[in-house]
Amino acid sequence: MKFDILTLFPDMFRGPFDESIIRRGRDKGLIRIGLHQIRDFATDRHHTVDDAPYGGGAGMVMKPEPLAACIEQAKLGNPDALVVAACPQGERLTQKLAGEFAEAAGLIIVCGRYEGMDERVKELLIDRSVSIGDYVLSGGELAAMVLVDTVTRLIPGVLGSDESARTDSFSDGVLEYPQYTRPPEFRDMCVPDILLSGDHARIERWRRRESLRRTLVTRPDLLTTAPLTPQDRKTLRELEADNG
């Protein structure tokens, strides 16, 4: 997977992309990351990349010429890649959407700044727009880091075990079950006996029940779209009765 990131602040990425899972993916040759300075594509002597918005209003807008030229240059090296804008107006990033991106030939991620980018660039050159939440950041760089990390985890071979990604929260529409490790007792709190039983069928049933319990308490909105089985629905009715 090739990630091309178009930004006015490429140095923001050098620390986060040199550590942890992203570094592992790069070291294994499973992902490649290119950083592109949008300002390099400005043609005036001041390398201007923003201007006042037509119609008035606060702030500045990213100019179309350097941004379009930067996108087109990145496409030359990754012609089948999806062009994704990281901006507040985009669709919410979800695990499902990250899975779709992980199947792409590559991602060209455009980091918005100021009051956003000229709308003509979006209409002509952007395939998708993505937001990481209902809040506003100073720019798309942090959102791009989140997107790269989320997608990288889903690329086979990056994690120590591909099962880790399959059991993450949101992977099957609900939150992950509680996890425990040694020691079996910590500050008078014990690991649930069932996890020490060796009965894998019972453990799987317990984990599913706890996933549903956690989702019901913390993120009940997820249950409206999660792919629930008849047994899941029965379990939820029992949990609701217990809480009722």
Image (cartoon, helix red, strand yellow):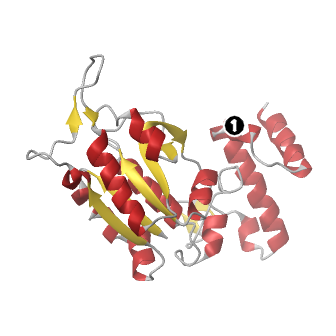
Residue found at the very far left of the displayed protein: 45
Q: According to the image, label 1 marks what residue?
A: 220
Q: Secondary structure at mark 1?
A: helix
- Whether residue 229 is situated above or below residue 120 in the rendered picture: below
Please give left or right for residue 225 compared with residue 157 in the image: right
Instruction: Where is residue 116? Give x, y as percent.
Output: 34, 35
> Which is nearer the eye, 139 or 233?
139
Residue at the (89%, 45%) spot, across then down:
234
Instruction: Where is residue 216? Give x, y as percent.
Output: 71, 40
Instruction: Where is residue 98? Give x, y as percent.
Output: 57, 56
> Which is nearer the eye, 140 or 23?
140
- Whether residue 181 is situated above or below residue 136 in the rendered picture: below
Residue at the (52%, 46%) spot, across then down:
128
Looking at the rendered image, the quarter that the C terminus falls into is top right
Based on the displayed image, in which of its 4 quarters is residue 195 positioned?
bottom right
Residue at the (34%, 67%) spot, across then down:
34
> Which is nearer the eye, 167 or 182?
167
